């Protein structure tokens, strides 16, 4: 596997930007992805837990669908490895009502991803990707959002 970054790196050197900028950019992206892949493989060579974690992360990431928006696989890979994954009942409020549904919940190093199952296949449509770097947890009795009672 480690020979592919070298092979495509040489091909990138032989593909001038001026001759075909699109092909050069695609090759550059591919070389970057292959190098990241080689690093992950080298880390997992002697560590079965890491190998298992990488395999599960790739399996999940390959099944993620971001709807009609084209998403670069490198951006998906930047989520990192899955820390926890499971099913979560998510409740949310619209202007008319409170709704709820079961969703896939995947916790990454700095993101929480919520997705619903695709009806047409084995994938998941991403509903939200929430950054965990600037969130805080508040007590349910913090007083926010409570309706004041009045004497009527």
Image (spheres, rainbow, N blue to C red):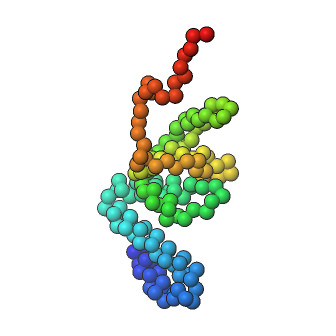
Seen from this angle, which residue lies furthest top?
152
Residue toward you, 48 or 148:
148
Specify the quadrant that holds the C terminus.
top right
Residue toward you, 54 or 66:
66
Q: Residue at x 64, y 49 (%)?
A: 118
Question: Measured along the vertical axis of the image, is residue 84 above or below residue 29?
Answer: above
Horizontally, is 123 left or right of 82 in the view? right
Q: Residue at x 51, y 56 (%)?
A: 61
Percent position (x, y) of residue 56? 46, 54
Specify the quadrant that holds the N terminus.
bottom left
Q: Is residue 67 at least partly visible in the picture?
A: yes
Residue toward you, 21 or 145:
145
Question: Measured along the vertical axis of the image, is residue 106 above or below residue 68?
Answer: above
Question: Measured along the vertical axis of the image, is residue 87 above or below residue 38?
Answer: above
Quadrant for residue 67, please give it.
bottom right
Percent position (x, y) of residue 101? 60, 36
Quadrant for residue 36, please give it.
bottom left
Q: Is residue 55 at least partly visible in the picture?
A: no
Seen from this angle, which residue lies furthest left?
46
Q: Residue at x 41, y 39 (%)?
A: 136
Q: Residue at x 61, y 46 (%)?
A: 117
Residue toward you, 127 or 7:
127
Quadrant for residue 91, please give it.
top right
Percent position (x, y) of residue 96? 68, 32
Percent position (x, y) of residue 35? 41, 72
């Amino acid at each position: 596997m480690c020979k592919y970054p070298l092979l495509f790196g040489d091909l990138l050197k032989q593909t001038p930007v001026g001759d075909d900028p699109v092909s050069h950019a695609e090759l550059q992206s591919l070389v970057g992805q292959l190098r990241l892949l080689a690093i992950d493989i080298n880390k997992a060579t002697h560590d079965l837990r890491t190998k298992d974690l990488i395999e599960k992360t790739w399996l999940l990431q390959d099944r993620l669908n971001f709807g009609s928006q084209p998403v670069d696989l490198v951006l998906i890979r930047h989520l990192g490895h899955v820390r926890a994954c499971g099913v979560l009942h998510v409740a949310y409020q619209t202007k008319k009502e409170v709704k709820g549904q079961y969703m896939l919940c995947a916790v990454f190093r700095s993101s929480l991803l919520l997705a619903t199952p695709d009806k047409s296949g084995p994938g998941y449509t991403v509903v939200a990707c929430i950054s965990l770097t600037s969130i805080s947890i508040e007590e349910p009795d913090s007083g926010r959002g409570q309706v004041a009672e009045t004497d009527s």
